[in-house]
Amino acid sequence: MKPKKFTLSLLTATLLAHTLHAETLDPIVISSDFRQSTLSHTIGSVSVIDEEKIAQQSDDTIENILTKSPNLNFTSGASRAHYIQIRGIGERSQFINPVNPSVGIILDGIDLSQSALALTPFDLAQIEVLRGPQGTQFGTNGLAGVISAHSVAPSKQPSFHTEMTLGNYNKEAWGFAGGGTIIKDKLLGRLSLYKNTSDGFMQNSYLHRKNTSNIDELTLKGALRWLLNDRHSIDLHLLHLDVDNGYDDFTLDNSRISHADEPGFDRQKTDAFSLKSTYQLSPKAHLETTISAQTNDIDYGYDEDWSYKGEFADDLGPYSSTDRYKRDRKQWDADMRILSDKGGEIFNATTAWTAGIYYKDFSEDLKRIYTYLDHPFTSNYDTTNSAIYGQLDTALNHALTLTTGLRLEQWDADYDDSDKMKINTDKLLTGGKIGLKYQINPHNLYYISLSKGYKPGGVNPNSDLPDNARHFSTESLYNLDVGMHAKYLEGKLTHHLNLFYGKRRDQQVKSSLVKAREDGSSEFIDFIANAAKTHYYGLESTLDYRPIEALHLYSSLGLLKSKFDRYTDPNPKSLNVNGRTPAQSPKYQYDIGIDYFWNHNIKLSTDLEGKGSYYFSNRHNAKAPAYALFNASVTMFADAWNFRFWGRNLLDREYLVRGFGSFGNNPAKGYAVETYTQKGDPKTYGLTVSYDY
């Protein structure tokens, strides 16, 4: 079936579902809001990936799991993707510039928005994807949305899980997690360790190696829950990550066979913790205090010429260079909020309330080591955020609830570098939302919300840039969501539907200058500009249908229409993209699947995931073609043992996850401008064996 016809058919089925009989709402609990609530009582577009679904893909990458959610995309570049976009909004790369994230990434209360490689799926209980601005609660990191992941919590009863995976491309992974009561009725604990390795999908013919874009990742997590008394509990989460991946993913002929003589690397070491105290001040209110801190050593580099010395004749003007970026990031956060409980409502007992204060201190020290620099380039970027926020949830009557939220955030940033550039930025930022939800009956919920998000401005360090391109301002996003949650067919069919419309002001976009060197090669000067105004609209829908106990049918659909209303660029030679769709904004994404229990011991699972065509960048016309991937698995259950045979992209479809189209890098072609692309994962398959106690 063609992708467009498939999308229209799925959308038609989604809309027809409104005519079916409704029953009770689903019990999925959302932990990312100020108060825990079920998914079906949440205002806004939220996707939940539960523990069962994560376990079914625990050997996969987190980005492949996430992108089955509507209107969520990612950009690769190395052996693993670093950058996530929601509704087409989000970073696609980082080189010399400091970057302020558009998509927040939170793991167990630790803000990992700057270091996405720290998120792995093993021993996760739930992932929540919040689409649209999250200005009230998450502030500067929540312009496009937030991904909040929660590890399996310590339990009173002893529990133990272990698994091992073997697959093609020399994939080996193993992990164990376990815990229980340490001190009866006082202290609970859990520990998990996961190691994942693979050769990757590139071959280096010059070095005679098959692992120059390898995966080598270790994740260690620990958790303690201290039950001080009936009114006070403390939760501690610890994280250690050690990543030593390869970076050899681009070739002059866009194949999977590299000629690089100095293949790169993509490394990260993270140590972090979060400490959360929950204290019942009285029967009417409680206090939540969260403190987190982290250090991240990030080091990535690559062979810029994608060739080896001597591959091209001297009269063709070949060059040889490497580029390396070493970053030392430190961050700590403190968040304190008071929340009303039942009986503590204000305004004649109609309004639940939340009030909080927040502080963050972030620093990033960069050292760039580049062949064409006489000495390493260094920079220091320090930011502090101070915020106050609050939210009111007012019951207008038994069915209608009004939510209003506001956040005031003071942003201070100081930048200086070895080129004697200094920029200080102080800005008061505001965000929030106003929403209305209508519980028409115990079975159907409708909502509408208007929210505002923001993303602070920043600096462009390169001294070759014109003065008007050396810094950029704050971006704002205004977003309207209208949606519903319900169940149909006596509870067998669950449906979540959201329609959205948004406007971006002073949109921050990537631009670039290409500067020719004397040896014939080109220098790629990256910078960010407030170049655009954009509007977008679309739809997000998820369906879960269980016609019989043994059969589970599900689908997710994201439709996105986005356009530059105005685009100006400090680079006079830039491409005119006025009226064009912004980068990383596919018009549709879908995932449709089946889980079938052959009997109590065998489960068959298949799914088809697809994505429409999209531009790689706003700087050129190179596009990723539309694609559809077929995945399947067979799981056999034997008491506490599971044996899962899995395969992804089983038809071995070729698809692209990164592309450049504004420079030339091939001496044999006179450095003519070409499109260079990185392929997504080919067909992979393997066996995962797990044991649960």
Image (tube, helix red, strand yellow):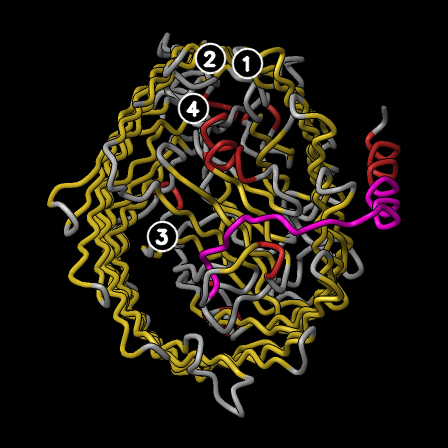
Q: Quadrant of the N terminus?
A: top right
Q: Kindly state the secondary structure of the residue where label 4 is placed.
A: loop
Q: Is residue 14 magenta?
A: yes
Q: Position of residue 171 (x, y in %)?
A: 39, 14
Q: Nearer the viewer, mark 4 or mark 3?
A: 4
* Tag nearer the camera, 1 or 2: 1
Under mark 3, the amino acid is Leu
Which quadrant of the view contains residue 41?
bottom right
The span shown in magenta is: 11-33
Judge left or right: residue 568 versus residue 172.
right
Dot 1 falls on a residue whose secondary structure is loop
Q: Quickly name the residue at label 1.
A: 600
Front residue (pair 468, 44): 44
Residue located beneath label 4 in the image: 59
Q: Residues within 10 Å of mark 1 (few under 14, many from 20)?
A: few
The answer to whether mark 1 and mark 2 are in CB contact below 8 A is yes
Marks 1 and 2, how far apart at CA: 8 Å
> Element under label 3?
loop
- Neighbor class of circle 4 (other Cα within 10 Å; few <14, some 14-19, many 20+) is many
Relative depth, front residue between 652 and 631: 631
